[in-house]
Amino acid sequence: MRDQIGDFLQFLVHLSCMDNTLILCGSNSQHVIIRMKVELRNKYFENFKIENTSLVGANLIKCNVSGSQFNNVKQVEQI
């Protein structure tokens, strides 16, 4: 069940790249994904848009985020 919820939330994040009215939905979904500690390594998040949220705690190692837009997003610096 937890995996299905994570998959659904990732789907909502992907919708943000198709329609600007869904940016808030994608941003909130991404935040919940991170809080649930869903495995994100090697996922594709190309061209997605998130704003007014935090990526603190996200493990985006080897994720493809090319073309993505981050507006007012708190991030952790990479080492």
Image (tube, helix red, strand yellow):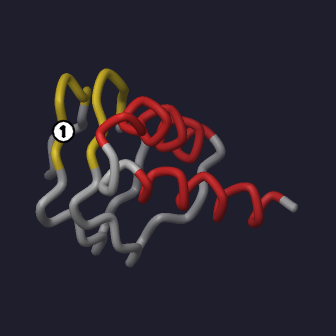
Left or right of residue 24: residue 67: left
Left or right of residue 50: residue 26: right
State the image coordinates of residue 79 (x, y, percent, origin top left): 14, 52
Hey, which quadrant is residue 3 in on the image?
bottom right
Label 1: few (<14), some (14–19) or many (≥20) C-alpha neighbours in 10 Å:
some
Image vertical order of residue 48 relative to residue 34, above or below: below
* Residue ID at (16%, 41%): 77
Residue nearest the observer in this picture, 20 or 68: 20
State the image coordinates of residue 12 (x, y, percent, origin top left): 53, 52
Image vertical order of residue 55 relative to residue 19, above or below: above
* Residue ID at (27%, 45%): 49
Hey, which quadrant is residue 60 in on the image?
bottom left
State the image coordinates of residue 72 (x, y, percent, origin top left): 19, 23
Q: Amino acid at mark 1?
A: Phe
* Residue ID at (49%, 35%): 25
Question: Number of callouts in the render?
Answer: 1
State the image coordinates of residue 31 (x, y, percent, origin top left): 49, 36
Left or right of residue 67: residue 25: right
Identify the residue position indicated by label 1 in the image. 70
Left or right of residue 5: residue 79: left
Image quarter where the N terminus lies is: bottom right
Secondary structure type for disc 1: strand
* Residue ID at (18%, 38%): 70
Residue at the extreme right of the image, as rendered: 1
